[in-house]
Image (spheres, rainbow, N blue to C red):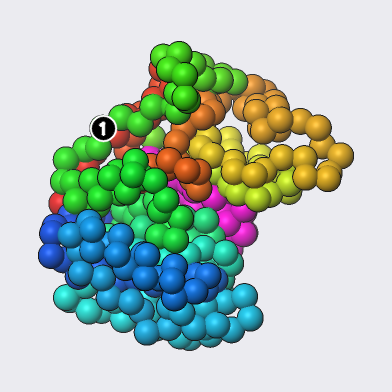
Amino acid sequence: MMKAGSVMTASDTSVKPLKARALKRGDKVGLISPASRPDGPAVMARCIKSMEWMGFRPVVGQHALDTQGFLAGSDSDRLSDLMSFFKDDSIKGIFCVSGGYGSLRLLDRIDYKVISENPKVLVGADDNTALLLAINKRTNLVVFLGPNLDELNSPASFEDLQLVVGQKKPLKPLNVRIGKIAFGGVHYAPVNGVVTGRILGGNLTAMGSLMGTPFQPDFTKSILLLEDKNERNDMLDRWFSTLYVSGSLAKVEGVAFGDFVNCGRKGSSNMLSIEDLFGDRLQEMRKPSCFGFPFGQGEDTYTLPIGINASLDTNKGQIAFLDSALI
């Protein structure tokens, strides 16, 4: 077993992904708020009901509705909820209720040895990308970029999340969002190509906060997923340029872009579209890339595993999963 605090790099071919057991009806699952507090008890009640409708038995973290400034309670209390669920053999999966900000503050205090010895389904998005990527790097556990429960707002997202966390075989390919008028897979790809690699990524802002830390992902031979919400173009360019100038972007095989909800100029002087903002770097580097995948924080968002192999075909606008995510 890996020692607590040691770093396991997913690019090491001798290391296999650590996979949790698929969830089944009747399983107990933990609900946590590792970052900001959800809007209130009514939101938590809806999250509880969503889990019950999926057939699970939700257990709310002791501090999931606490408040300390912009955080859901103190760092120690939020960490306690996370680790207590990983230590509890009766809890089979853990779902993040809300995003916001705060997961980054927990990373150097997590007991990764406990997680590696008790692999469980872990789902989250937004700021919780930092939590997912840190755990994946330190333990090689396959984690899931999926909607925080307070943003689980559509039947499509609900049904997909329920399917993904309970499936032992490779998931169906994910195609670019067609839109309300079905033109049959029309999409924008700055660079066309077919590449394979390990799925990595999530929220661009949260990932940017990991750069230069011991929790920075290993981008080697990865298919990089990127999404964001409520950010100005200049800030998005800052984080993406960080990936570029650090050399991290050069290591990836290809890039798949999800939803960038309510992002754009927002008062800045940058008039570029989201596609323009990222496309020039990718064309320069000739990295296969494609926009329009339904993951992130949009209305109909799908749940993707981080840490397994997949192929990205920008000609088709498709991500095909080559391995199972759960056992």
Which residue is more in the foreground, 2 or 191?
A: 191
In which quarter of the view is residue 117 placed? Answer: bottom left
User: Whole-percent x and y of residue 54?
Assistant: 22, 56
Q: Quadrant of the N terminus?
A: bottom left
Residue, x 33% and y 77% (percent of image)? Answer: 60
**Segment colored magenta:** 198-221
User: Whole-percent x and y of residue 260?
Assistant: 59, 41
User: Whole-percent x and y of residue 66?
Assistant: 49, 83
User: Whole-percent x and y of residue 210?
Assistant: 58, 59
Residue 220 visible here: no
Residue, x 53% and y 70% (percent of image)? Answer: 39
Quick check: 101 above or below 177?
below
In the picture provided, is 303 more to the left or to the right than 52?
Answer: right
Which residue is more in the foreground, 120 or 57?
A: 57
- The disc labelled 1 sits on which kind of residue? Lys
Which residue is more in the foreground, 168 or 37?
A: 37
Residue that sits furthest to the front in the current view: 42
Residue, x 28% and y 45% (percent of image)? Answer: 159
In the picture provided, is 86 more to the left or to the right than 100?
Answer: left
SS under mark 1 = loop
Q: Based on the picture, tell me whether residue 205 belongs to the magenta stretch.
A: yes
Quick check: 70 above or below 135?
below
In which quarter of the view is residue 33 placed? Answer: bottom left
Look at mark 1 in the image and give the residue it sits on: 172
